[in-house]
Every structure is written in C-alpha cells, then in structure tokens.
Amino acid sequence: MSNKIISIILATIFFIISLATLPDYGVNWDTINHLPRGQAYLHFFLTGKKDFSDLPTWKQYFQDPDTLWIKTNVPGNKVISRSIYQSDGTTFNWFAEHDGSGHPPVSDILSSLSNLIFFQKLGLVNDIDSYRIYGVFLSALLIGLIYYWVSSLYGKFAGLISSLSLSLYPLFWSESHFNTEKDIPETVFWSFMFYCIWRGFVKKSKKWLVVSGIFFGLALGTKFNILFSVIPIFIWIAIYLLKVGVGYIKNVFLPLIISFVLGVTIFIGSWPYLWADPLDRIYSVFKFYKSIGLTTNVDLRFLGPLNINTYPLYWILYTTPIVILFLFIFGMVVVVKRLRKDQNLTYLFFFLWLATPIIRVIWPGTTIYGGTRQIMEYIPAMAIIAGIGGKYLRERIGRFSGNKISYLVILLLFVPITLKLIEIYPNENVYFNSLIGGLKGAKAKKIPFWGNSFGASYRQGVSWIDKNAEKGAKVVLAYELLPNIPSIFLRSDINYHNSWRSGYLREGEYAITLTYDGTDERSYYDSYLTKFLNPVYEFDVDGVSVVRVWKNDVDHLKVPWNEEVIGNVSYKKQDSGLTFDLRNIYKISRFEINYNDMYCSKLSNGVVRISKDGKKWENLPGTLPNSWRISHLGQQPLNGNFIEPFVGQEARYIDLVLSHGNTCLKNVRSFKVYQLVEDL
C-alpha cells in the first residue's frame, strides 16, 4: 500500500474518531471573541451585507449537549437556520472599526463557514459543534501530512510512530476538538508551510514554494506566530544554498517573493479592519502581540540562568507522554549524530522547526501563560523526531529479537498513554505525566495553570445539570462569564444568569466552575462554595477535580451554619478609610454597615483587608464597589447599606481602604460583625 493511501486512511480514522467525540468538549473561553466576528465578516464576504437583517430572528431553544446532531426541543427540529453567534450587536461595521486588539480572523471566518455548511445549510450538525468540524478536519490533514512526509523519508514505521505520537499527544488531541480559532489552525498551517518550503527546495519545485505562500497567509491571518518561522527558514535556506551553491538563489528568488506577496494579500484581504488604514492598524496589532508576549511578570521559580524563562521547558517535560519523550530522545540522538552527513539538511530543518517556538518563549524578557498551547507548533516537530527515534530503536531491537517482535515492542509502548487518555477523557489537556506524579503532582508542586482546561470541561457539568436539575432551576457560573457555556446547551426551563449567585443566603442555585490553579480563592463565591458545600457533581483527573457543580442550599452544607454577632467591636475613622478592631481573633462570616449617604461622595474604589495582628494584612478578593461577591444582593455598597461576606477567615482587624475624600461609607451609623461558631 502506498504512503499516500496510508496517510489518507490515518487522517480519515483520526477525523472520524474526533468527530464522534466532539459532543463531549465545551467551547473555548475565547469563542465569544472570535465566532461573532467570523460570522460578521463571512456574511459580508458572501452577501455584501454589513448586518444580519436578511436572516430570520434568532430564538432561544434547547440543544441536547450530548449529541453531535441537531436534537432540540423545537417541534420537528425546525430550528431557525441562524447561529447563536450571528448577533445583531456585533456586526461588520463594529468590527471594521474596533477589531485591532486581538488575533487576525481567518480561522474565525473558516470556522463560521463550517457552521454555515453543516448547520445552517445542510442541517446535519448542531450549531456549536458545526464550527469545530473545521478544527478536527485540519488536525486530520496534519496527521496525514506527518505520516506521508516522514514515511517518504524514513519508511512506513517511522511515519506511523510520528503520526501516533501526534495523535496521542494529549494537548493536540484535546485542543483539536475545541481550540479551532487560533492554536490548532496555526499549528496546521505552520506545518504545511514548512513542508511546502522543504519540498520546494529539496525537490527543486518552484510550484511548492509558491504554494507555501497560501499557508503563510492562512497562518498569518490566524496568529502572528508564523512570523517567527522566518528565522529558522532563513537559517536553513542560507545553509542549504551554501551546500548546493549560492547560484541556486536565482531559481528560488522569484517564487519566494510571489509566496510572500500571496501570503500578505491573504492576510490583508481577509481582514476588513485593516482596509481603512493598513499600516497604522497592522501596527496596532503588533502592539497587541507585544503586550501579551513581552513582560517582566515571570514566576521567579522559573527564572533560569541568564534570566531564561524555564516555565515552558518544565511544561513540555511534564506534559509530554513518557513514550513520546523516550522516543524523542532517541530521535534527537539520531538528528545530532547525522546532522552533518544529511545531504538535504532535513534533520537540521526539523530541529530548527522544533526549537523556534520554544526559544521564542524562553528568551529573557518573554513570557507565556496557560502552558504551551500558544506554541503548539513544536508538537508536530517533536512527533517527527519521535518517529525517527522509533525507527532507530526498532532497528536496534530487531537485531536481537527479529523484525516482527521489534515492531510489536515499539507499538506496545503506546498502550499506557492510550489507556490514560481514555481514563481522563475528555479532559486530556490537563494531562501531566508520571515524572511529576500526574495532575495531582502538578497541583502539589503548584505548577502555574495546572488543571486549566480553558473551557473544555464545562460540557460535562452542563450535561449533568440538564439531566438532574429540577424544573425552573437557577444556574450560575461561579466566577466566569456567561458565554463560556452556550445558553442553548441548558434546558429551556432553566434560569441561567450570574445574578442568581446568593452565597451565604443559600437561595438554591446550581453553580458550575472549572477547578484549577487559583480558583479556590479567586473570589468570595469560589471560596464559599469550596469551603462550605459538598458538590453534587465533579469529575476528577488523578484525584484532582477539574469541573464541579454545587447546589447552594442547606442540604449540601458540609457542616451546620451557625453564626452570631461579635460584641465590643470598635472602629477608627481615618483619611484612608475605616479600621475595625474586634478585640480578639474570630472566624468572620459577615460584616454589615449602615451609613449616611447624604451630602457625600459615592465610593469610587476601595479594598477590604484583614489582619490578625495589625501588621500583616491580607486583601480580600476583588475591589469595591462590587456586584460579584453576592450578585443576588446587588452592588455593594449602595443606598446607605454595605454587606461584606467572609468565608471564616481568622482576623482581629478589618480595614476598609477607601477612596480619599468625603466618601459616604465613612459616615457609619451602625455596624455588625458576625462570626462562625462552629469549627470548619
């Protein structure tokens, strides 16, 4: 069987499995920033219209979140063929003027095209998952490309190991299902562009060099990461020309220029925001990337020699499956050993590909957050080198045990990671390997962003709520924004809004959140839920919860809630605010102030902090005025009353640091401080 046929088969298998598993992944947190824009631009390109007035009015309905297909509460499934992300509030005109503080829109548009085809026109796939067909299709193409490329160079077995390594890389597998507007498309376009350039030079094909411009444009129109590819490509081309003769530049100069112009044309042509003033607006996009990529806010624990940011290196080490790390090490031995003898410099090509995204984020003064999803371009290169290592190891084993046994031994190495991914499914992007003790070990060692699935795990909690919540139930997100869960995934009788957060009032709302690094203490409501309530649903990975649902009522309290007013409390009024002295250390549950709001200024900003000794102070999460602590109470302070909830923190002093001037809250009429009288 030819390499081309096998590559198609592998890509098809990956696509079918990915498609079948799509309904278990939630939407990426950034979806609300991408898909409305993609729909606005796509609608303009296809119809010339700058709004959605030609479409039927969108109406709320319930889509079963457990299925890929359209299964709704609308009679006969006659769902209006308009997406939830085709919003009248975010039209072409708005984006054409205000779209410079984010990533380019190519993959937003192509995701929206996928929705248009499979949901709006064909009526096959539900509104949400139809966008993600684009992502899994691209990922499947990459699986096929990696097999075809590697097998053509090093044989079918090396190609199979490379494609397996890519398919079973937890971050790639998971993100391919729901990160379809940025990182997955960028990784795919980057890889195809590299292949076209490599083939153009090695096979002396001008056509492939020109085609590389298409993928350059698609990548540039998705994220600016592709600009860093200029460095390894330039280095490789320079060394290649020295090897084959500098005169060869005459043959490739024009195709490379055409490729660059083609890429820039795709980039500008696909982004209407740039049209009014391309130079100035492209500059504004560069400033956006500078703001997120260059910072001094680096965790000092990961500051290595020469101020190198070692965080990405730790993340790669601890989140790459052991088998892939093992084979990658053997592959690197081969790459280094054969580097000089490589006629076409292909080993050097793969090494530069691998190194560039990583060096970009460990360079002194640079940073990255959320693990390595933003530099996923390194994963295909790592998979290729792992395939090279797999071939090398098989040949060594084959000398002693025969070829059939050696094939089987290498393939069996992938069984543990396959079983692990099945075990933690669909939360593969929170995977940590055994070198750190799994996710539990990453949590214990406080690796930044441990457990963060970036929205993928919501769907599990939503599915539980739909099946178990009583009719008319209230549902809130513990901290996050409402678009993180598409409203059509919740039953039509459910009241979904964050204004139902009731905290210690315990009004019976269901609260859902992802649980990861820092969430337990990021807000009062998070701390309250975690400390006082038993969850009604949670999913664990390695013994660590990654998504939880609580019901905020008396029946689910961990211990009885008993509180009483603390007596003999005094306070001092100062220019900086108010300081209350409780005389002793108590576990505080609530703090209330009644104040005179006549002839004074409303509070513009403030902070509540506590202390046991009056010397070391701890700020409570959030600032004042605030409506997030307990949304059900409304904004605090307001109309002469102020309520500050606590979660049993031990303190003697409560300090209100308030905006200077005649702030109303300083005009105290009366106050009460409550303590919890049960040990927690």
Image: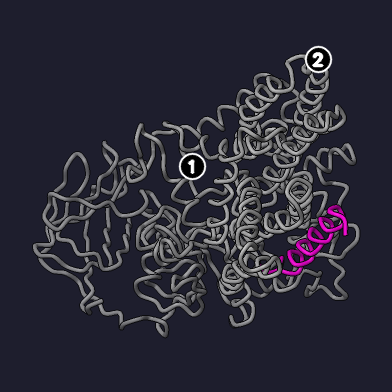
Category of crowding for the residue at label 1, using alpha-carbon neighbours closer than 10 angstroms: few (below 14), some (14–19), many (at least 20): many
Q: Residue 15's x, y, as percent? A: 78, 61
Per the image, label 1 sits on a secondary structure element best described as: loop
Q: Residue 47's x, y, as percent? A: 90, 40
Residue 279, placed above or below residue 302: above
Locate residue 218 relative to residue 27 in the image: left or right: right
- Name the residue type under label 1: Ile
Q: Main secondary structure of the magenta part?
A: helix
Q: CA distance from mark 1 to mark 2?
A: 40 Å
Residue sitting nearer the eye, 42 or 310: 310
Q: Is residue 189 visible?
A: yes
Category of crowding for the residue at label 2, using alpha-carbon neighbours closer than 10 angstroms: few (below 14), some (14–19), many (at least 20): few
- Kindly identify the residue that appears in the image at 88 percent across and 75 percent down: 76
Give yes or no for residue 222 being in the magenta stretch.
no
Residue 231, placed above or below residue 317: above
- Kindly identify the residue that appears in the image at 30 percent across and 48 percent down: 607
Residue sitting nearer the eye, 108 or 407: 407
Q: Quadrant of residue 199?
A: top right
Residue sitting nearer the eye, 328 or 561: 328
Q: Is residue 269 visible?
A: no
Q: Which residue is mark 2?
A: 250
Residue 470, placed above or below residue 478: below
Which span is picked out in magenta? 1-24
- Name the residue type under label 2: Lys
The circle drawn on residue 368 is 1
Colouring of the image: one colour
Q: Quadrant of residue 79?
A: bottom right
Q: Residue furthest front?
A: 400
